[in-house]
Image: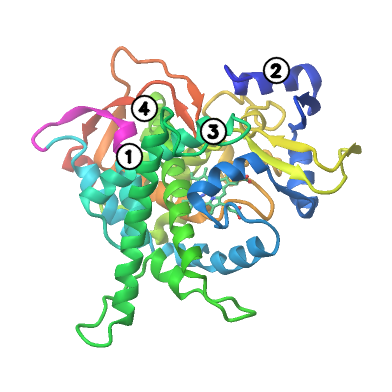
Amino acid sequence: MRADYLGFVQRLQRDHGDLTRMRIVNEDAWDLMSPALVREALVTHADSLIRWERGIAVFEQVFGQSVLVTEGDTWQRQRRMLMPAFSPRRVAGYAQLMTDAAQTALDAAVPAGQSEALVTMDTLWTDVAMDVILRTLFSESAQADARDAAWATQTLSAAAFREMFMPFTLPDWLPLPGKAAKRRALKALRGLVQRHIDVRRQEKGAPQGPPAPERADLLHMLLALHDETTGEPLSPQEVFDQCMVSFQAGHETSATALLWWSRLMAEHPEAARRAQAEVDTVLQGGTPGPEHMAQLPWLTATLKEALRLYPPVAALMTRRTTAPITLGGVAVPRGAMLRITPWVLHRDERWFAQADRFVPGRFLEGAAPIEKGAWIPFGVGPRVCIGQHFAMLEMTLLAAMLLQRYTLHQPEPAVACAPQLHVTLRPDVPVVLRLVQRRQIDLAG
Ligand code: HEM
């Protein structure tokens, strides 16, 4: 299981069907591998499920009592309060911060004066996505902040992945490999977030002096939120924890999705040319914005297809039953562990013809409808990703901006790469592409 988790779950389904049960030491583990079973669990029985405790114990160290971690009434209150900050309308307001972040990094991907370059896309997208999250959270992104935050989030993510497979977390003060780095990473990230919150609170509280700049960022939103029923704002700790979540949940996932997408574009020049033509026609060389989203159906389809083939959260969406439930007519006891593996659903021929092939057309209007619950890169049910509109907007804007500037090619000879499960699904080798500057004439025409 550890050596090839995704292959293991696929074989499990092939040999034993859509609902399986296995005992792993003390765990009563159930794998749900059809859309109907997944929806029955995550939608119909949502009230009888909590997150898997081990995952929570690992995440809690970094994310505190944030919406990713909490359960019951606290989660309901936090989710209710946060939803407006992540609605499609609000998220549209962050578009300019996103494109500002991407502009410099994408322009500089191929050095000035050169017509092409071999570019390590992992670094490019990690830098851009970090800049996006810093700017959408705090309206600004200093280079030192971005570097520290990128190192810290990667270190914390690697530590989380290691700890996830251990039955308990050893104290961070122990002189064990990785512990010192984890301590430093946590300190750096917490320091950075706190610094920005302090500055903002000072700005708000300052009675004299120049008026504080009007900000349209996520931190502004978080500080302004009030519970509809009680009128209470988020507590200072909740604002802090929510910023920490946005870093981790919003950075690596989007960067990984864009990484796989750009590789797929280089592998499928026909699809890339069509996306480029669409972008050129709609944008006429201008900067993309939320108003263009609906006019870029092919580009959106390529992104959705990339999320299908390589879902950043590919496995280990795990829950615990807090009451007996039935799934597909089978009685599942209280205390069972339910495992959902988007990778398996997304590559099942019953829901996706030619499931292993890149076929963006399946996501176009007019194509055969996709079985509900078969495409779940953002999860499903009440705990569905709160950042999904944010992520789709970010990815579409950034993808369009990349295609405006460059044509993507595989280097020769092309390097094979295989997906590897970390916290997100990463390629096992760096993705290096040949980016060729598009001539002005291309852009104009
Ligand atoms: C391509 C990008 C992204 C992917 C694939 C993704 C995927 C997911 C998935 C699968 C879940 C549900 C996990 C489960 O049910 O156990 C989730 C939850 C969550 N995501 Fe995302 N996410 C992305 C981007 C973002 C962004 C940009 C943010 C915030 C800025 C974000 C914030 C969250 C939060 C707070 C939750 C927990 C929601 C809750 O439990 O109520 N995500 N995400």
In percent of the image, x 47 and y 38: which residue is there?
302
Q: Are marks 2 and 4 in contact (CB under 8 Å)?
A: no
Residue at mark 4: 266
Which kind of residue does numbered mark 4 sit on? Ala
First of labels 2, 1 by sequence position: 2
Crowd band around label 2 with a 10 angstrom C-alpha radius: few (<14), some (14–19), many (20+): few
Foreground residue among 90 and 160: 160
Observer-side mark, 2 or 1, equals 1
Q: CA distance from mark 1 to mark 3?
A: 18 Å
Residue at mark 3: 163
What x and y, as percent, mark residue 93?
A: 40, 66
Which kind of residue does numbered mark 2 sit on? Arg
Residue at mark 1: 151
Q: CA distance from mark 3 to mark 4?
A: 35 Å
Q: CA distance from mark 2 to mark 4?
A: 30 Å
First of labels 1, 4 by sequence position: 1
What x and y, as percent, mark residue 68?
A: 57, 52
Which kind of residue does numbered mark 3 sit on? Glu
What x and y, as percent, mark residue 56?
A: 61, 45
Considering only vertical position in the picture, is 175 above or below 55?
A: above
Observer-side mark, 1 or 3, equals 3
Crowd band around label 3 with a 10 angstrom C-alpha radius: few (<14), some (14–19), many (20+): some
Q: Is residue 445 visible?
A: no
Q: Which residues are magenta?
A: 112-124
Residue furthest toward the left?
113
Q: Are marks 2 and 3 in contact (CB under 8 Å)?
A: no
What kind of element bears circle 4?
helix
Crowd band around label 1 with a 10 angstrom C-alpha radius: few (<14), some (14–19), many (20+): some
What kind of element bears circle 1?
helix
Residue at mark 2: 11
In percent of the image, x 34 and y 32: which residue is there?
122
